[in-house]
Image (cartoon, rainbow, N blue to C red):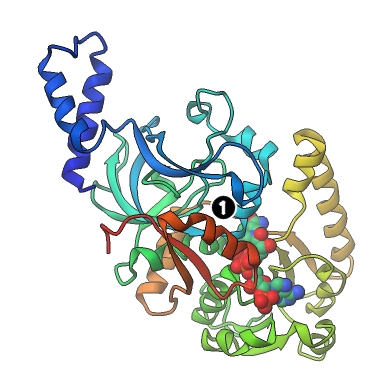
Amino acid sequence: MSYSRYLVHRRLLLHLRKCPSVNTSTSRLDSQKRLISTSNRCRTVMPAWVIDRYGNNDVLRFTRNAGFPVIHYPNEVIIKVFAAGLNPIDVSMRGGYGAATLSMRRDPLNITQSGSEFPLILGRDVSGVIMECGLDVKHFRERDEVWAAIPPWKQGSLAEFVVLSANEISHKPKALSHIEAAAIPYVATTAWSALVNTGGLSKDKCANKRILILGGSGGVGTFVIQMLKGWGGHVTVTCSQNAERFVQGLGADHVVDYTAGPVEEPLSKLEKFDLILDNVGGDTERWALGLLKPWCGAKYVTLVTPFMQNTDTLGVADGMMQTAATVATKALKHLIKGVHYRWGFFVPSGPALDEVRDMVDAGQIQAVVEETFRFSQVPQAFEKVEKGHARGKTVVQISQDGE
Ligand SMILES: NC(=O)c1ccc[n+]([C@@H]2O[C@H](COP(=O)([O-])OP(=O)(O)OC[C@H]3O[C@@H](n4cnc5c(N)ncnc54)[C@H](OP(=O)(O)O)[C@@H]3O)[C@@H](O)[C@H]2O)c1
């Protein structure tokens, strides 16, 4: 839908909402409404992929009648989605992952009439154009091209429109298409939170630091390799053998094949590291912290944490207590050995994406899109992500208007 058509629809919708008592059978409004209805029904609804319950891929349902997003707060914007990136969390959320915690964070104004989170729209990455701004939005205007990572407690980007806060969005890099741009925000903001906020790295504090990325060939890994190389770090990566050349092409200095045997053996022969980012989890914690330089402020940051599983299985209060106890015990255990143990989490951030955009514009980061799907192929896109062994990102093209 073009911007001008969008405006006609929205103005009419607002007018209709303000005038509930108008006799639409005889009024001028009625003729206007019918005029629009012939081509595109009055926009209280939009096309989207939704789920109405948690489960496997069968729960994904396409509808033309998903609720149209509404600006509830003055700092919000409505974005027309051109492309939506998928992440492993979308597959997990489809199955109910994090339902307890996320339900607690959902805005009551956005809870549907049924009183539950359903119908729920997945999709955490968006690249698109702003159609409407709340009254307090200062740094963005209608028609600006933007990208964003959508918090998992908000409706996602597998829809024609999405509403977000202005502090969650950023102007999209001009050099990237919408499809390319939709491959970056969620992994970039996760990496920023884990490496900068938790790991203490920055563009001025990374030169010659030795960093190990466990699981370097997927969405997070392919972004992090480029970001750290852009900042002058020395990057070692683990991945399977058939991804070695791929990650070297992104800048990895040293690659270790985890499928060739216990990966800790070749890693332990290398010079020790200043920081480890763990995208793999499982038993990596058993040996990975021994690869850090002791008593130098070196940190291990894992993205694979039991936080959501704890709240899903134990309830929010007990789950949080269990989580706090687990992380405190582990942090203390490793602190007395001279290394720091941390958990990393996705944090939505427009300002972080501004910094990433500068790196993209400077040619330091490129989008790594493994496969693109059409809007009609969302279930196939989920199947692709679910199979694992990603080599970059899976993106869904929602609209061709922006290309
Ligand atoms: N805490 C948070 O807020 C947060 C945010 C984002 C992501 N995450 C988590 O971080 C992890 C990575 O995310 P992602 O988007 O990068 O996932 P992804 O795109 O699926 O990539 C994961 C990659 O890890 C590789 N891998 C699997 N097992 C491995 C092993 N034992 N050693 C080395 N590499 C291995 C796989 O490649 P091969 O083909 O080489 O096996 C795969 O491509 C996921 O578990 C995700 O849930 C957490």
Left or right: residue 341 compared with residue 203: right
Rendered position, 328 above or below 257: above
Amino acid of disc 1:
Val
Q: In this view of the protein, can residue 196 be seen by the observer? A: no
Question: In this view of the protein, which residue sits in the foreground, 262 or 1?
Answer: 1
Residue 43 occupies quadrant: top left
Callout 1: helix, strand or loop? loop
Rendered position, 237 above or below 10: below
Residue 31, horizontal then vertical, whole percent: 12, 22
Residue 280, horizontal then vertical, whole percent: 73, 68
Residue 283 occupies quadrant: bottom right
Question: In this view of the protein, which residue sits in the foreground, 18 or 337?
Answer: 18
Rendered position, 338 above or below 47: below
Name the residue at 24% across, 20% down.
16
Ligand 1 picture quarter = bottom right
Residue 368, horizontal then vertical, whole percent: 48, 74
Question: In this view of the protein, which residue sits in the foreground, 80 or 132?
Answer: 80
Name the residue at 43% across, 79% down.
364
Residue 243 occupies quadrant: bottom right
Query: Label 1 crowding class (10 Å Cα cut-off): few <14, some 14-19, many 20+?
Result: many
Q: In this view of the protein, can residue 25 be seen by the observer? A: yes
Residue on which the image places disc 1: 347
Residue 289, horizontal then vertical, whole percent: 82, 72
Question: In this view of the protein, which residue sits in the foreground, 226 or 211?
Answer: 226
Count the marks: how many? 1
Name the residue at 32% across, 55% down.
399
Left or right: residue 74 compared with residue 158: left
Left or right: residue 96 compared with residue 361: right
